Image: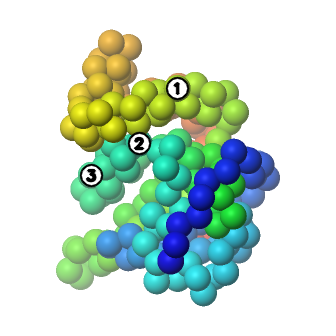
Amino acid sequence: MKRPEPIDEEIVLDPKRYIVSKTDPKGIIEYGNDYFVQICGYKETELLGQPHSIIRHPDMPKIVFKMMWDRIKNRKNIYALVKNLAKDGRYYWVVTEFETKVDPLSDEIVGYTAFRKAAPKKAVKAIEPIYEKLLEIEEAGGMEASEKYLRGYLEERGKTYDEFIDELIGNKGLFKTFFKMMKRMFG
């Protein structure tokens, strides 16, 4: 499927609604709730069986996705601020939390569920210049260079990635409560 050309138009998400998608261990979409389908603009039949990267916006640094995959493959949670790309080229910002699904008999990862909610505007405004810098570094020196820069950026501030994101999204307790409810519904 051909990726859309990004346009500079934001889809404003309903702060009271949530986006959920489920993938297999390789990131192939197996399920998307109605709001996910509506916001990204694809028909459900167009999404199912596609890699989740179908909605990856080119403004997102690759290092962010590498960190996310490294964490969830190791069964560790991560919150992330993500800019996604809709089928029509518009974009939308979300705070994402993941849940790794493990087969209780084999103890193997059988899939991932992503829970998303509208990102706070303040967090988006703060993260955009950082993502721009990481993209610039990736283009010049690759993902390894952007990872080193991000580590240095966080070390300079005396924060882990998680602490940094917590600070950006503010009121993490509200997000945690919300995502906990979603996990009960979709778990």
Q: Which residue is mark 1?
A: 129
Q: SS of the residue at dot 3? A: helix
Percent position of residue 35, x then y: 71, 67
Can residue 150 be seen from the camera position used here?
yes
Q: Amino acid at mark 1?
A: Pro
Q: Amino acid at mark 3?
A: Asp
Percent position of residue 63, x then y: 33, 43
Residue at 41% from the left image edge and 42% from the top image edge: 61
Q: Is residue 2 above or below residue 16?
A: below
Q: Which residue is mark 2?
A: 61
The crowd level at tag 3 (other Cα within 10 Å; few <14, some 14-19, many 20+) is: few
Q: Amino acid at mark 2?
A: Pro
Percent position of residue 43, x then y: 67, 81
Please tell me in which quadrant of the rendered image residue 156 appears. Answer: top left
Q: What is the distance, in whole Å, between disc 2 and disc 3 at their CAs?
A: 15 Å
Eye-nearest disc, 2 or 3: 2
Q: What is the distance, in whole Å, between disc 1 and disc 2 at their CAs?
A: 11 Å
Can residue 117 be seen from the camera position used here?
no
Q: Which mark is residue 70?
A: 3
